[in-house]
Amino acid sequence: MLTAFTFPGQGSQFPGMLRENLPDDPTTHSYLSHAESALGQTITSIDSESALKETVNVQLALLISGVIWGKYLMDKGCVPDYVMGLSVGAYPAAVLAGCLSFEDALQLVSLRGRLMQTAFPQDYGMLALLNVNRTVVESVLEQQVIEGKRVYLANINAEDQFVLAGYKPALLETAAVIKSKTRCTSRLLEVAVPSHCSLLKDQSEYLLSKLEKTIINRPKIRYISASKSRLINNIDDIRKDLSHNMANQVHWHDSSQLLLERGVGRVIEIPPGSTLTGLCRRVFTQGQCFAAQSTRLDTLLYQHL
């Protein structure tokens, strides 16, 4: 049975995730020590409650967690055939695929977080819409843009689940207009920047200039772009995917469909969180979807055989 690892983006983080939610083994301690040395800061300074209010720390914590958990499962014999990450989740996916070194990923994600945080230090963010028709969402967004509102469709996570990005007052106003037209629910996400829209185009171009000086290897494990909804092998394409996914719309639903069409029967979400597992279950109705943090290791290993 073909297996895919998925890696979450911002919103799945929680305080202590690097101190209390990682495997207790020598590989984990080695990676944490490496991260502290490369970043010049302690793990405690990255995943405390106050630290996770900063975009940089959130993204670093997700990278470190993704790489350690992915490596741990692979060392135990659970090796994926595909990897796919949402937003910053593409970086641990690229590390495990063999495209990017852990040290380079730490530096790039640190820069990525600073670029995003500096561009929009306050009053911007993201909002999720659940149980809503895409036509209604796009119709309201079109009118809001005509009126000069800074709000964008950022994520297409499922046929009835979407994420908007932009100026918070505009996000709340847009959600209210959508609710006046149809029954649905909405909530602001724990994301302090307007990701996956044109507001971050300049930042993504700057990040690309740094990635062009970074060694990228062809993937040893198949790498799926959640922005493009396709398999990527070309080194330059991987560079562009890693740099521009902060500004590109996320097509998680279509990307999950691609995995299904390629014969994947099992999807394991790498900690933290289980949101991607819920989304994948809507696509893999006959398959197996697990959130690693709430699944017994022997179950993951047995199902892999």
Image (cartoon, rainbow, N blue to C red):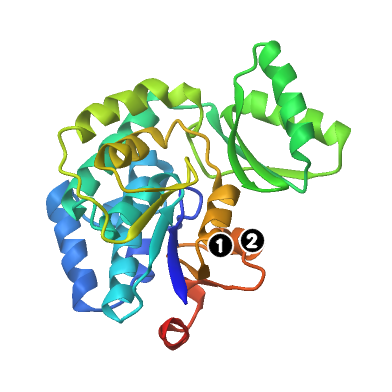
> Mark 2 packing: few (<14 Cα in 10 Å), some, or many (20+)?
some
- The image shows residue 280 at horizontal and vertical percentages of 59, 61
Amino acid type, label 1: Leu
- The image shows residue 99 at horizontal and vertical percentages of 24, 52
Q: Left or right of 91: which side holds 172?
A: right
Name the quarter where the C terminus is drawn.
bottom left
Tag of residue 260: 1
- The image shows residue 104 at horizontal and vertical percentages of 18, 46
Q: Left or right of 141: which side holds 219?
A: left
- The image shows residue 54 at horizontal and vertical percentages of 38, 40
Q: Residue at x 20, y 70 (%)?
A: 29
Q: Where is mark 2, residue-wise?
A: 283
Residues at circles 2 and 1 in contact by the CB criterion of under 8 Å: yes
In front: 269, or 59?
Answer: 269
Q: Residue at x 12, y 54 (%)?
A: 37
Is 277 placed above or below 12 here? Answer: below
Residue 270: quadrant of the picture:
bottom left
Amino acid type, label 2: Val
Q: Residue at x 65, y 16 (%)?
A: 149
Q: Residue at x 50, y 79 (%)?
A: 295
Q: Left or right of 6: which side holds 131?
A: right
> Mark 1 packing: few (<14 Cα in 10 Å), some, or many (20+)?
many
